[in-house]
C-alpha cells in the first residue's frame, strides 16, 4: 500500500514538473518574440477614425503627445475638414506627419494653437516631401516652449480633392543629435616659456573651416566640444584652447590640464553653430620649445529636422 502511494506521488510530481516546463517554455518564447519584435505594440496603437470631426470645437481628442500612436483617417466625400487636438508637455518640439498619395492632391494641413492661430501650414503638391519615394508626406511643426502643458490642433482640409480621402497622421520628435570628429591641418608650434611667465605661452593658431561641411546638419547647435593632439616633446602644464571663430571673441581654455586632450565649458546654452570656422592653439608653461600635430576636434550637436527637409543626418 505504501509502495502504491509512493508511485502515485511520483507520477503527480512528474506531471507537475512537465507542466512547469511547458509554462517556462511559453514564457521564454514570448520573451523572445517581444525582444525581436519590439514594434508590435507601436503598430497595434494605430487607430482608424471616421468622419464627424469637422470643426475645432468637435475635434477628435488624440490625448497626450506620443510617438507610438498614429491615426488612420477616413474622411467621407461629404466632409471637407478633419480636426484633431492633442496636449503637448512643456519644452517639447515636435511635428505631425501626414501621409500623401496622388489621389489626395489639393489637400492641405495646418498646425494651430488653442487661440486658433496658425503655427505652420503645408499645401500639396508643392510642400510634399519624398515625392519620389514610397512614403511621401507633409509635415507641420509645433513648439511648446512654455512652462506648462498646452493644447494644439491639427486641421486637414481636402482642398480640391474629391471622394473618400484616406491618410495617416503620426507625431514625431524634431530635435535630433549627432557627433563627428574633424582634423585640423598643419602643426601648431610653441616657442617655449623662456621668460617663465606664470600665464604660459600660446602656440601658433590652426584653423578648421566647417562652414560648408556636409557631415553637419544645417543650423546644428553645439552641445559639447573636445580636442586632442600629439605634443612633441610631451610636457606638463599644457592647456588646449578653442575659439568658435565666427561667434566668439574670447578663447575657451580646456577645463583639464593635459597635453593630449581638452574638454571645454561649452554647451547648447551658448548657441554656437557647428557649421563655422574653428581655431585651435595650446598654452604651455614649460621653457622648452614644442609642437603639436594630429589635432582633432570632436563636436556633438543637436539639430531640428525641420531645417533639413525632415531628413535625419
Image: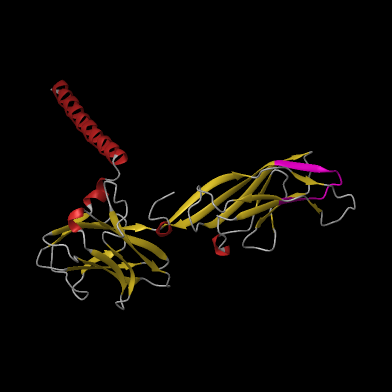
From this view, report whether residue 262 is shown above or below residue 35. Answer: below
Q: Is residue 71 visible?
A: no
Q: Tell me if 231 is positioned left or right of 221 in this view.
A: right
Q: Is residue 151 visible?
A: yes
What number of labels is visible?
A: 0
Q: Which residues are magenta?
A: 281-293
Q: Residue at x 20, y 26 (%)?
A: 14
Q: Residue at x 53, y 49 (%)?
A: 213
Q: Farthest bottom residue?
A: 115
Q: Tell me if 298 is positioned left or right of 220 in this view.
A: right
From this view, report whether residue 287 is shown above or below residue 21. Answer: below
Instruction: Please tell me in which quadrant of the rendered image residue 82 appears.
Output: bottom left
Q: Nearer the viewer, residue 205 or 70?
A: 205
From this view, report whether residue 68 is shown above or below residue 146. Answer: above
Q: Position of residue 141 (x, y in %)?
A: 35, 64
Q: Residue at x 77, y 40 (%)?
A: 234
Instruction: Please tell me in which quadrant of the rendered image residue 272 appears.
Output: bottom right
Q: Position of residue 238 (x, y in %)?
A: 76, 48
Q: How is the image coloured?
A: secondary structure
Q: Farthest right residue?
A: 195
Q: Farthest top residue?
A: 3
Q: Nearer the viewer, residue 27 or 44?
A: 44
Q: Residue at x 63, y 53 (%)?
A: 278
Q: Tell me if 234 is positioned left or right of 224 in this view.
A: right
Task: Give yes or no for residue 45 being in the magenta stretch.
Answer: no
Q: Tell me if 253 is positioned left or right of 32 in this view.
A: right
Q: Farthest left residue?
A: 78
Instruction: Please tell me in which quadrant of the rendered image residue 84 appears.
Output: bottom left
- Which image quarter holds the N terminus? top left
Q: Position of residue 11 (x, y in %)?
A: 16, 25
Q: Position of residue 159 (x, y in %)?
A: 19, 66
Q: Main secondary structure of the magenta part?
A: strand
Amino acid at each position: 500500500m505504501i509502495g502504491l502511494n509512493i508511485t502515485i506521488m511520483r507520477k503527480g510530481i512528474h506531471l507537475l514538473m512537465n507542466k512547469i516546463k511547458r509554462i517556462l517554455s511559453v514564457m521564454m518564447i514570448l520573451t523572445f518574440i517581444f525582444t525581436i519584435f519590439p514594434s508590435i505594440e507601436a503598430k497595434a496603437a494605430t487607430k482608424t477614425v471616421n468622419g464627424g470631426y469637422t470643426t475645432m470645437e468637435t475635434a477628435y481628442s488624440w490625448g497626450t503627445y506620443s510617438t507610438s500612436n498614429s491615426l488612420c483617417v477616413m474622411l467621407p466625400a461629404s466632409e471637407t475638414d478633419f480636426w484633431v487636438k492633442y496636449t503637448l508637455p512643456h519644452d517639447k518640439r515636435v511635428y505631425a506627419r501626414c501621409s500623401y498619395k496622388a489621389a489626395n492632391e489639393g489637400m492641405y494641413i495646418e498646425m494651430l494653437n488653442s487661440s486658433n492661430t496658425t503655427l505652420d501650414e503645408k499645401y500639396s503638391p508643392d510642400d510634399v516631401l519624398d515625392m519620389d519615394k514610397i512614403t511621401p508626406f507633409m509635415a507641420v511643426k509645433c513648439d511648446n516652449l512654455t512652462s506648462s502643458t498646452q493644447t494644439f490642433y491639427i486641421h486637414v482640409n481636402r482642398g480640391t480633392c474629391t471622394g473618400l480621402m484616406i491618410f495617416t497622421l503620426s507625431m514625431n520628435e524634431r530635435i535630433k543629435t549627432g557627433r563627428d570628429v574633424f582634423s585640423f591641418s598643419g602643426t601648431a608650434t610653441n616657442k617655449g616659456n623662456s621668460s617663465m611667465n606664470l600665464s604660459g605661452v600660446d602656440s601658433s593658431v590652426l584653423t578648421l573651416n566647417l562652414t560648408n561641411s556636409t557631415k553637419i546638419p544645417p543650423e546644428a547647435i553645439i552641445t559639447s566640444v573636445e580636442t586632442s593632439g600629439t605634443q612633441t616633446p610631451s610636457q606638463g602644464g599644457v592647456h588646449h584652447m578653442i575659439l568658435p571663430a565666427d561667434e566668439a571673441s574670447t578663447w575657451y581654455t580646456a577645463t583639464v590640464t593635459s597635453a593630449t586632450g581638452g574638454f571645454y565649458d561649452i554647451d547648447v546654452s551658448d548657441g554656437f553653430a557647428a557649421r563655422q570656422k574653428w581655431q585651435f592653439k595650446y598654452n604651455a608653461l614649460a621653457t622648452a620649445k614644442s609642437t603639436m600635430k594630429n589635432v582633432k576636434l570632436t563636436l556633438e550637436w543637436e539639430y531640428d529636422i525641420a531645417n533639413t527637409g525632415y531628413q535625419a543626418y
